[in-house]
Every structure is written in structure tokens, then in C-alpha cells.
Amino acid sequence: MSSLVQGLVDALSIGSTYALVALGVALIFGIMRLINFAYGEYFMVAAYAMLAFDQVSLALSFLFVIAAVVAFSLLTERVAFRPLRNADPSTLMITSFAVSYLVQKVAIVATLGEARTVQIPESWLTPLQFGGISIGKLEIIITVAALAMMGGLNLLLTRTALGIQMRAAAQDFRMARLLGVAADRVIMSAFAIAGFLAAIGGFLYVAKLGSFTPAIGLPILLAGIVSTVIGGLGSLKGAVIGGYLLGAIQVLLQIILPSDLVAFRDALVFILVIVLLLFKPTGLFGSYVQRV
Amino acid sequence: MMLETERLCVNYGRIVGISDVSIRVQTGTIVALVGANGAGKSTFMSAVAGLLAPKSGAIRFDGEDVGALSPERRARKGMSLVPEDRGILTDLTVGENLQLARSSGRSDPARPFDEALARFPILKEFWARPAGALSGGQQQMLAIGRALVARPKLLLLDEPSLGLAPVIVDELFAAITDLRDAGSTIVLVEQFARRAIQISNYAYVMKNHCVVAEGPPAKFADEQVLNKAYLGGEADE
Ligand SMILES: Nc1ncnc2c1ncn2[C@@H]1O[C@H](COP(=O)(O)OP(=O)(O)OP(=O)(O)O)[C@@H](O)[C@H]1O
Ligand SMILES: [Mg+2]
């Protein structure tokens, strides 16, 4: 019973992290048709930004991480992607690879590739007790924070003028502009929000890991991309559901696989994804087909 | 003069879209732009609205050279294009489509939707529905209603009658005439050439990327003139 509940909480917290990454990826893809392979590096920036005020002030650290990652996100848009705004999706994607590679190499040179650790409050790590069942507090914090952000994003997208503009731009950028929507503004907003999601997601992810290297972004990016593909590229709802589904599958396999097969967990996950795509090439909620 | 283009040339890569198109639109008039399929009408409209960059030539809007401005800047200055495909945002509701038109910053801050809803009451009824659930004719009403929310100085309509039932087309032409009489300036691209010319103050006929005839409606009253301009092209209606 206890391990079942813990497994559920694990799946929810891992799924929450994936859902946040997937949302960031999907948001940028929706508006720019860019599959941003540099998005993992937004998490890396979050991780290193946590070092600045480590053991000084948690609140300050949190705010600094948000500022740093949002700034970094906007910088990649301005420097790398804006000049290519009218390029085709594959050019944009390759550019994002280049950004990812460059930033990672810089981090490796700067840190010699060594791991860094962050200190997080003891109280975050003490499990909560519910009648004999203990549940990790950090997992709950991650889940609640992710759900809160999804709720917030949903409100923003449906209730505000900017949100309506962003959804319009995601569907038909040309028409949005004809109606007076400023292209720069919606794109920068999408990058700012994606940066915000990566900041919070990264902060909590690193808090859970405790230590990290410059390679921290890769698994997270992979999970985000796989989640968006499962849910259907271009669908925000799909990205969230894909994230939770991926988290659930991973945790489930972790529990049910015999111990000598656990090493093949991720391989199995990818096989499942491939099978899904064979039956539903656009993902669960996707409708995106490459424009010709 | 609301709009004036001077020897406007637009290419798609190496394919010619329009060549040397010079058109003048007086404030408060309807200018009809007709011609066979592929003549270059939509290309002209897209270039005026800023979707296509001209290869050469000038676009003056309300006395200002707008040739280098982005589509959104032109929208903010008072241009509204209803494109051939209507550009309905089907993932958004009818209401959100209308709200979106406030992005131009030109809508009436107090009662932005009054005119659109008065003209097309159906939009009020379907306010909360996904726009993708509207019929073709209803979508056309939404497209034009949405353009009106932005209170444009110049309304560019690219084949508004496309795919509409004859009765609806009658209503549409009445509405367009109405708008002009209320002071709007309109460029009207149409397949129903004769009808478009009838309600216009001035008309241009395009063929093979160029303007081949122009004049007031009276000039085209004689069947022969229009047919000759089309040069045996498709008859209208
Ligand atoms: N996207 C494009 N790529 C290449 N050529 C194009 C493109 N769009 C239009 N053209 C060419 O430009 C010319 C003008 O086309 P345009 O769409 O402006 O005609 P039109 O008068 O609007 O026709 P229709 O009545 O069919 O709407 C045509 O010869 C067409 O082949
Ligand atoms: Mg056309």
C-alpha cells in the first residue's frame, strides 16, 4: 500500500516536471514552428543560477533563477532565432542544436565538467506522514507548483488579450498580424513564458537531484520532446497529458520490471512511443502536419 | 486619396505575381478589382496589406509610404484585409476572433463590437462557439465583422462572395454598399465581376499580372467592353 501511494506520487511529480518541459517546448513550437533543442539548456541555466544565492536565501535564489532563465530565453530568441524567423522549421531546429551545443560547451569549459551541488532546506526533504504512509514533501511541492502553473497558463491563454493573441498566432501567424498582433511581442511572450516554466521546473528538479553537471539538460529535453510527440506537436493539452503519461509509464516500468531489466526501462519507453506513433502519427491530440 | 500604388511589381521567387500595377482609391469609394483566375488580384491585395514584399513600386496609404511596414503596422494604421481564405481562427471562439481585432488598437474602447454585431446579429448568438463550428457563410460574416471591429480606414475584401449561396451574396453586396455609404473606403476583389462593378465607383480589370482596363462603372455597362478586357476569359455569373 505504502509503495503504491509512493509510486503514484512519484509518477505525479515526475510527470509534472515533464509536463512543464513539454509545455515550454509546445508553446514555442506552436508560435514559431521551432522544435527548440536548446530548451534543455534553459534548465542548465536554472541549475547554475541556483548557485549564486545558494545557502544565502531561498527566496532570493528563486527570484534570481526566474530572472536569469527568462533573460536567457529572451536572449536566445533575440540572437539566434529572430534573424531566422522566416526560415523553414528544419533550419530553425538545427540552429537550436547549435545553441544547445555552444552553451553546453561553454558550461563544460567554465566548470571543467565537474558536478556542483546545491543545498536545499532540510524541511523539504523530510517526508510527510499520513497514517503510516510516508510521502516525499518535495514531490508534493513539485506537483502542486506544476499544476498551479498550468492553471495560470490556462487563465493567461484564455482570459487575457495577450493570451488570445498567442493562441491566434499559434494557429495562423499571418492572420494574427493582419489583425494588428505584433509578431515580436507574441514571440517574445512565448519565450518569456517558456523561460519561466523552465526556471520553476529547473529549480525544483535540481532541488530534487541535489547535484548536477553541464549535461543536466539532455534527459529533461528528451523527456519534454517525447512528451510533446506523444501528446501531439502543437497541442498544449497534449503536451501536458503526454508529460504525465510518460512519467506514469516510467514509474510503472520501474516498479514492474524485474531488477535485471530495469536498465532497459527507457528503451522500452521509446518502443512504446514508436508503437503509438505507428498507429497515431500525429500523437494523441495533434493535428499538425508539415505545411508545404 | 486613401490608397495609391505606383507600378507595383511582386514576384514569388522567379514567378511573376503582378507587374506594374498602378491603382488609385479615393476616400469613401468602392473600387472593384476583377479579372480571371490567376490574374494577380490576391497578390495585389496581399502586397498592399504587407504580406508580400514588392520587388519594386510604391504603396501610399493615406498619404504615407507604407511599402516597408510590417502587416501589423499597416493594420494599426487602419488597413484591414479579409483574405481569400477568410483567415478564421477556428481554434478560437467567435467572440475571441472579434476580440483579437482589438489588437490593432483602433477599435472603439467603449463599445468595440456594436457595429459588427448590429450588422451580423448571428455573431452575437454564436459568441461563445468555436469559430470552426460556423458554416462557410457565417464564417464570412465573422471575417467581415472582425475587420469592422478594427474600424479600418481601408477595407480590403478578397472575394467575399466565395462559396456563398446566392441570397447571402445579395445580402453581402448590400452590406458592402452600406459600409461605403457610411463612409468606408473599400477595395473589392470579385469573381462576380459585373455585380462588383455595378456597386463600385471605379473599376480595374486585371489580366496576366497587369491592369488591362479601368474606368467608372458606366464604361463597363456595355457587355462588350468587359468581355474584351477579359479577352474571351471566363464570363461572370
Ligand atoms: N504562392 C505562390 N507561389 C507561386 N506563384 C504564385 C503563388 N500565388 C500566386 N502565384 C501566381 O501569381 C499569379 C497571380 O495569382 P493570384 O493568386 O494573385 O491570382 P488571383 O487573381 O487572385 O486569382 P483567383 O481569382 O484564382 O483568386 C498567378 O500566376 C499564380 O500562379
Ligand atoms: Mg485570388
Image (cartoon, coloured by chain):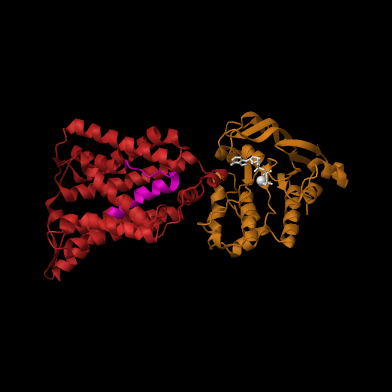
Main secondary-structure element of the magenta-colored stretch = helix
Q: Residue furthest right?
A: B222
Q: Could you say where residue A228 lies in the image, as x and y percent from the top left? A: 35, 53
Q: Could you say where residue A236 lies in the image, as x and y percent from the top left? A: 39, 55
Q: Is residue A223 left or right of residue B193?
A: left
Q: Is residue B206 visible?
A: yes
At 78% from the left edge and 36% from the top edge, which residue is drawn? B212
Report the number of discs: 0
Q: Nearer the viewer, residue B195 or B227?
A: B227
Give the chain ID for the red colour. A
| Whether residue A136 is situated above or below residue A100 in the rendered picture | below
Magenta extent: A18-38
Q: Is residue B100 left or right of residue A283?
A: right
In the figure, the shade used to draw chain B is: orange
Q: Is residue A230 left or right of residue B113?
A: left
Q: Nearer the viewer, residue B135 or B119?
A: B135
Identify the image quadrant of residue B113.
Answer: bottom right
Quadrant of the image containing the N terminus of chain B: top right
